[in-house]
Every structure is written in structure tokens, then in C-alpha cells.
Amino acid sequence: MRAYLDHAATSPMSDGVAAAYLAALRTVGNPASTHAHGQDASDRLETARGEIAAALGCDHAELILTGGGTESVNLALKGLYWGRRAAGSGATILVADGEHHATIEAAEWLRDTQGAQLIWLPLDAEGRLHPETLRAALAEAGPSEVALVSFLWANNEVGTVQPVTELCAVAAEVGVPVHVDAIAALGQIPIDFARSGAAAVSVSAHKIGGPVGVGALLVSRRATIEPLFHGGTQQRGRSGTQDVAGAVAFAAALAETLGAGGEPRAATIARLTQLRDELIGGIHEIDPSAVLRGPRPGPERLPGNAHFTFPGCQGDSLVFLLDAAGVSVSVGSACQAGVAEPSHVLRALGASEAEAAGALRFTLAASSEAAEIEQLLAALPDALVRARSAGLA
């Protein structure tokens, strides 16, 4: 048996979601066509759109289906920036430190090619963006000069959950729209777009057992967003033939993950939290020098996230050694896997380069089992000895 503890990178499809996906893939017809086949496809698409929208707390018309989380983030940042600039706002973008590279690189592209002024918002040692930090940055830049604000709902590496409604309220006081990247948060904490106060929220299907290449951007009716793609106007803010099967599978994955009212199922979260806490306790017993990064277990941390740094180890060495023992883990975001550099998230939290080099992320989901935690804890002592003998080269 292999243990899979990297659900933040991607989470497997259940049999039920796979069956719904396969059945929808056999649907014939373009949903934009007016004949019977097209209208059948359109009915399936719009039913799925309504189910996704209801699960995420947004209106049917506020949901833009995309080709994944990265596209959703890019559409949010670039589309909101261009829309705000056309309406006369300034060129400043406020972005929290420690963001996913989709946000970092989109923001830097706007800076390098579109004249944006990029300001990074500091986090505390546990990865929190404090409302007073945002308020001070808005005041210093001048609200009329700020095109938008962007931050993660929950950090994809260290699992820190941000005070989203408070942060959005701070920006709303001065009329600045906020984009929130909820890709890592979806399925583990409630995502209610209407209550959040955000102008845009990005999500992705494969983080909760949906298909890769399917995502969504929730955009408030009040927000103006310029499209990245042109050539059809099938959706507000996005052209292109819509993926019926992807939408159906995303809706099915949400239905399995969320209970009544769009909140993650309480029994699942309780079991997930217990498994995570057993993992954290087991690691501390094996290696008391290991440092849990991010907030301690509680409401400010994702229930399926445990992120450690191991002194004297190279994280990549531990990934290799644990993989050889049948345990799949990661050093951080899969989008940066294989890049030999310390985590920018840990550096934003104040960790030294040597400390950040020993990072290891363990992430769980509803399908995780106690036996996988046991397999990790059995393999970890030998991996640590061997990794420390190799050192930080």
C-alpha cells in the first residue's frame, strides 16, 4: 500500500464523481447550439452551474467556469485591474506575501508590462494578514490609487486561514475590490461568497476530487471584469465553448464534499482534524526538534494541513526517502516542485533560508485513512537519519 499525503496538490476522484464525469463526457452537443442536442447540453451545464453557485454562496450569474485555478486567478487579477483602470482608479495592487505563484506571477506581469505599482503586504510569523496591516497600506497608498487587493483565503503551504470578512470589510470601507484565492480552502472550511464581501473568489475542482482543468471564478455583479479571452462571449468575462462534463463533475465533487448549507461535512472535518492531530503528535514524538509552521491546530488552520521544518534536513531528500518507503508528501506547492529554492512562504513568515530548506508539507482529505498516518510515522525515523547524514547540500 502507498500512503498519499499530498491532497493539496490534487485529490483523487471518487467512484461517484468519476461516474458522473464519464456520463457527462458522453453528452453530445455544444451548449451554445440551438438544436435539441445543444439544448440538452445547455440544460446539463446550467443545472451544474446552479449547483456549484449554490454550494459556494453566489448567484448563478456570478459564476464563471474556467479551465482551472490558475486561469481563475489570472482572470481575477488582470480582469479586475483592467476594469478598474478603465474606470479611473490608480495603478496600485496590494498583494499579501506568501501567495501562490499564480497570484505572484500574474501580479508581477501586471507590474512589468501594464504599469501596475505592486505593494506586498507583510504577514505575521504564523502567516496571518492582519486587518490593520491592510488598512495602513490602503491609507498610505491612497484608496483612489489602489486598483485591487488580493490574498489567499487559506495558505496552500502552511494552512493559515485568513480573517476574510474582516479584511474585505476594510477594503470595502474605501471602495477597493478584493480578490480572494480560495483554492486551498475549498472543501475544508465554509466558502460563502455573498457573506465574504469579496469582489472575486477563485476555486479549483481537482483540489476536492473533481477533474483537473476545471475551475471557477466568482465575480460580484457590482464588479467590472475585462476578459482574458475574446471570441464568443459565452460567459461574462470569458469566451470559449463551455465544458459541460467538467461542470457536472465539479458539481458532483462539491455535493460529496459539502453538506447542507454549503459547509464541509462536520463528521468528515472532525475525522480529518483527528488524523492531522495524530500526525502532528507523532512527528513531535519522533523528532522534538521539528517545528510546526503556521498556526497551531484550531480554527485558524486548515483541518487537513500539517507543515513542518526539520532542522539539518533538505526537504527534497525527505520527499525522496519517504517516496521510496511508499509515502507521498511534498515540500510545498506542486507548482514549484523540483525548483531548488527555499519556500517563499516560509521566508515571508520570517524563517531563515536554512530553516526553510527543511520544509515538508502533509495534507489530508476525506479519503485519508489512519493507516496512511501510521505508514508515514513508521517510515519517518529512518528517513530523518538518512536525510541528516546527507545534510543541506
Image: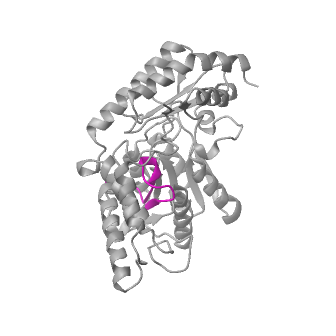
Asked whether, in this view, residue 130 is left or right of residue 58, the answer is right
Colouring scheme, one of rainbow, by chain, secondary structure, one colour: one colour
The answer to which image quadrant residue 113 occupies is bottom right
Q: Is residue 228 magenta?
A: no
Place residue 175 in its image quadrant: bottom left
**Relative vertical location of residue 357 with respect to residue 106 in this rendering, above or below:** above
Toward the front, the furthest residue is 1
Q: Position of residue 186 (x, y in %)?
A: 40, 47
Query: Where residue 329 sits in the image (x, y, percent)?
Result: 55, 33
Q: Residue furthest right?
A: 393
Give, as a single range, the part of the protein colored magenta: 195-217
Observer-nearest of 92 and 388: 388
**Residue in view at x 44 percent, y 60 percent:** 216
Q: Nearer the viewer, residue 175 or 332?
A: 332
Q: Is residue 207 magenta?
A: yes
At horizontal 70% and vertical 59% (from top left) the residue drawn is 112
Which of the two residues, 59 or 335, is positioned nearer the viewer here? 335
Q: What residue appears at the point 56 percent right and 45 percent down from the top-left corner?
A: 99
